[in-house]
Image (spheres, rainbow, N blue to C red):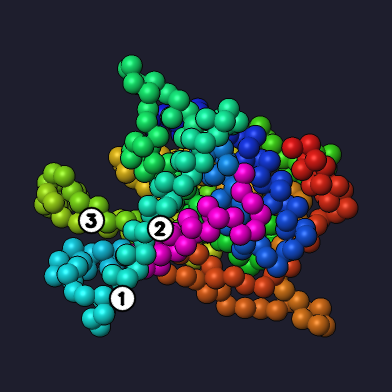
């Protein structure tokens, strides 16, 4: 049901919701630019909660989002791939008491379990109450709860419905906001790339409207920027551990059945045989000499094989919409000191299941007064 609801075709029906939330992001960035990390987190939550539960996120201190954000933090920064592998290798560690030196992860695991139950139950109950009141809007969970399978109505107590719905948020909120932090860092460090993308948008879209999804096929350089964001600093440098279901031989290497396999996305994106100067942010590496998007640009950033992220099409749409909308209306640059000189800095990154730039000071300014008008008009239209 997950794969069907979020297929490439069905994901397109969410474009209006996504673009509306992106336009609100632009307003927020104009109002309080220094809070851009919080704005990215709010945007990610707003899109996913609207699509999944038909829920409109409160801009600050939303009760649903607060629980989910905390759960994501615990899962990503405490339940790391390294710890999972260590416990799989030494199962005895799972039985040590939480007070024992090195056993602190068990307290975090207990908090995770309690929060997970809240995250599973509360949003679904919200949808159930709206359905009963006749005020529910279209959403993934709402459609599931009202769907007939055979002759039985799907129960709101169905654990599968709750688990799948929570997976949508947990799998998408952190990754989208993290990718946007990578985007901002790249634009600050590579202003010439930003200017070139903006020139393409101005030429194709013009200055009388904001970009739309229909423009995507006509913006190859922006597409190159989008693809390079995913490659330059992959937010999932090492995918979650998987176990092989059968024995196999890969490039002459024997892989037994039942072993843990870690996919090193970071190494794949730093392969010098495929990417010249891989440490540089270079959108042209995804384009042909004539400027079109090169074939075979599909990437492993959303996972591989049967375990590929089923929400990848929605995530792809959301990230592209933010990238093109910000480039069309705003200019991102290095922070300046009191004398007006740019302040250099060394980027720092988080570690864990996901990795993204730590917040850094920068300037976020409208490209023109016309851009400001378009931003405010778009929110009024939505």
Tell me the tag on residue 115: 2
Look at discs 3 and 2 and give the one toward the viewer. 2
17 with respect to 23 (left or right): left
- Which mark is on residue 261? 3
Please identify the dominant SS of the magenta region: helix
Q: Where is residue 311 shown, x and y percent of the image?
A: 45, 41
Q: Which residue is at a point 32% across and 65% down the rendered structure image?
A: 109
Q: Secondary structure at mark 1?
A: helix
Which residue does the image show at 43% across and 30% down from the upper left?
Answer: 144
Point 80% across, 57% down: residue: 366
The residue depicted at 47 percent of the width and 41 percent of the height is 125
Residue 294 as seen in the image, left or right of residue 151 = right
Against 145, residue 305 (above or below) is below
Which of disc 2 and disc 1 is earlier in sequence?
Answer: 1
Q: Which mark is residue 243?
A: none
Q: Is residue 43 visible?
A: yes
Vertical placement of residue 17 versus 30, above or below: above
Q: Which residue is mark 1?
A: 104
Q: Which residues are magenta?
A: 56-80
Q: Does the stretch in magenta take in 330? A: no
Front-lying residue, 180 or 33: 33
- For label 3, the crowd category at 10 Å Cα-Cα, with few meaning under 14, some 14 to 19 and many 20 or more, is some
Distance between the alpha carbons at the discs numbered 1 and 2: 17 Å
Q: Nearer the viewer, residue 58 or 360?
A: 58
Q: Quadrant of residue 239?
A: bottom left
Q: x, y (%) of residue 363? A: 74, 68
Sooner in the amino-acid sequence: mark 3 or mark 1? 1
């Amino acid at each position: 049901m997950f794969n069907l609801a979020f297929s490439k075709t069905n994901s397109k029906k969410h474009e209006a919701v996504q673009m509306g939330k992106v336009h609100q992001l632009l307003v927020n960035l104009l109002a309080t630019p220094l809070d851009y990390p919080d704005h990215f987190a709010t945007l990610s939550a707003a899109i996913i909660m609207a699509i999944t539960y038909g829920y409109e996120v409160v801009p600050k201190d939303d009760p649903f989002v607060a629980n989910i954000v905390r759960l994501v933090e615990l899962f990503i920064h405490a339940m790391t791939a390294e710890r999972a592998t260590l416990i799989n290798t030494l199962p005895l560690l799972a039985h040590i008491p939480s007070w024992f030196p090195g056993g602190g992860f068990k307290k975090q695991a207990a908090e995770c379990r309690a929060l997970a139950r809240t995250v599973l139950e509360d949003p679904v109950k919200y949808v159930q109450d709206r359905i009963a009141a006749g005020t529910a809007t279209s959403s993934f969970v709402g459609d599931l709860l009202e769907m007939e399978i055979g002759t039985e109505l799907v129960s709101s107590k169905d654990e599968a419905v709750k688990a799948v719905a929570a997976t949508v948020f947990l799998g998408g909120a952190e990754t989208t906001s993290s990718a946007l932090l990578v985007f901002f860092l790249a634009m600050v460090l590579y202003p010439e790339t930003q200017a070139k993308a903006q020139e393409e948008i101005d030429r194709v879209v013009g200055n009388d409207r904001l970009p739309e999804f229909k423009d995507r096929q006509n913006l190859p350089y922006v597409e190159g920027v989008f693809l390079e964001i995913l490659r330059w600093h992959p937010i999932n440098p090492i995918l979650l551990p998987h176990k092989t279901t059968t024995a196999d031989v890969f490039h002459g290497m024997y892989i037994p059945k039942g072993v843990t396999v870690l996919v090193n996305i970071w190494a794949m994106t730093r392969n010098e045989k495929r990417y010249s100067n891989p440490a540089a942010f270079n959108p042209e590496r995804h384009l042909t000499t004539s400027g079109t998007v090169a074939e075979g640009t599909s990437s492993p950033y959303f996972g591989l094989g049967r375990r590929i992220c089923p929400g990848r099409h929605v995530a792809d749409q959301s990230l592209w919409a933010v990238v093109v909308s910000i480039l069309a209306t705003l200019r991102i640059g290095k922070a300046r000191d009191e004398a007006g000189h740019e302040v250099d800095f060394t980027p720092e990154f988080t570690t864990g299941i996901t990795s993204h730039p730590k917040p850094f000071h920068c300037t976020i300014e409208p490209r023109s007064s016309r851009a400001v008008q378009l931003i405010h008009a778009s929110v009024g239209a939505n």
